[in-house]
Amino acid sequence: MTDNNDTPDASGEGYFGRFGGQFVPETLVAALQQLDTEFTSAMSDDSFLDELARCNREIGGRPSELYFCKRLTEQIGGAKIYLKREDMNHTGAHKINNTLGQALLCLRMGKKRVIAETGAGQHGVATATAAAVFGLECAVYMGTEDIRRQSLNVFRMKLLGTEVVPVTSGQRTLKDACNEALREWMSSVEGTHYILGSVTGPHPFPTIVREFQSVIGREARAQMLEAENRLPDVIVACVGGGSNAAGIFAPMIEDAEVAMVGVEAGGRSMSPGDHAATLCVGSPGVLHGSLSYVLQDEDGQTADVHSISAGLDYPGVGPEHSYWKDTGRVQYTNCTDDEAMDALVTLSRTEGVIPALESSHAVAEAIKQAAKLDSDKIVLINLSGRGDKDCNEIQEILARKE
């Protein structure tokens, strides 16, 4: 492990500065090495890249639209607000970008089965979709609390032919689903590929997921130049594990004129157990196979977390986000449950777009950013998913507020 690298991946060992690496049982080392080798080979193979582009286009529905929020911009009275409409992708979120790529890698490795973890259910649905498209056996691990919150996505996964495995340990949410998926992979690794859903986990997963999600930022860059003849002044994205944010940040990370803001779950309060603001108040530690910022107690035990959104209540974050925090390239902040709900209602009623609860955290921060900027500035929101999956939960929350 190296702690003094000045650039991401400088060690060639999957590190971003001091973050990343492989902290896994010996039984997974060979599979991770195979995955790294196949991914490196695939990314220089024109036939693989062509097939991935075809899948993104014909299955995922790419490119996703760049949308100017005219009425919201007028209401806020500051900078222009744009949406990168990942909510319009097939399956309803950015997750399909990664699952199609990893399913192709699975076929390339000669494996016939995939497993995944899911919180909000979007990665689970996207994995189930890719498995159905390519004829792969599929099982998705999901905490029972998230199964309760995301019953529609559970039904979608089952309809697509995937086994949904309930997880009853811990808080019965995303962290616990990750734990169980990793345990299963250790016993089935020879014929099974683990489609990890975020830029977390052991090397090479953070790099793989970031690369497959970077299609968001590459498109957004070209679309902004076409629409405004320049790049946005600020990009805002929600951060749980961090895949949608990494996907839009990475292709413009070298553009110094573009400020970047990642928004974590501020939950009910900043008291321990009431939020999932890992980069805001966490400390470096090892979780799920890599070194990154983690919410933990003085003894290094992973802390309980909370968020209104099932996709953000995770006590860790991707190692590249940890690196971007330490270098100061990306600013990380948090948004409360109430602020996210208010932003969801505002966007719904000004633009006819119902965002996912996760994405609503980014919307809330973008409204704050736009309000303090001049009208010649541009704020771009990565709208990572649509709110269909959350409507039952939203209905209950709004009813309690009445």
Image (spheres, rainbow, N blue to C red):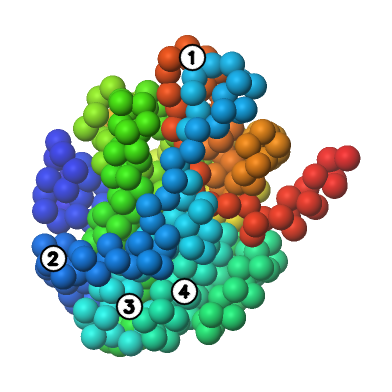
Quick one: label 2 or label 3, which is nearer the N terminus? 2
Real-space CA distance between mark 2 and mark 1, rounded to the nearest whole angstrom: 43 Å
Q: Are marks 4 and 2 in contact (CB under 8 Å)?
A: no
**Residue 385 visible within the image:** yes
Q: Which of 299 and 369 is in front in this view?
A: 369
Q: Name the residue under label 4.
A: 129
| Quarter of the C terminus within the rendering | top right
Q: Report crowding for label 3: few under 14, some 14 to 19, many 20 or more residues within 10 A (C-alpha).
A: many
* Residue located at (39% from left, 85% from top): 136
Secondary structure at numbered mark 2: helix
Real-space CA distance between mark 2 and mark 3, rounded to the nearest whole angstrom: 23 Å
Q: Nearer the viewer, mark 4 or mark 2?
A: 2
Q: Report crowding for label 2: few under 14, some 14 to 19, many 20 or more residues within 10 A (C-alpha).
A: few
Q: Do the residues labelled 1 and 3 touch (CB within 8 Å)?
A: no
Amino acid type of the residue tagged 2 in the rendering = Asp
Q: Which of marks 3 and 4 is in front?
A: 4
Secondary structure at numbered mark 4: helix
Q: Residue furthest top?
A: 374
Q: Name the residue under label 2.
A: 46
Q: Name the residue under label 3.
A: 193
**Relative image position of residue 274 (x, y in whole percent):** 63, 43
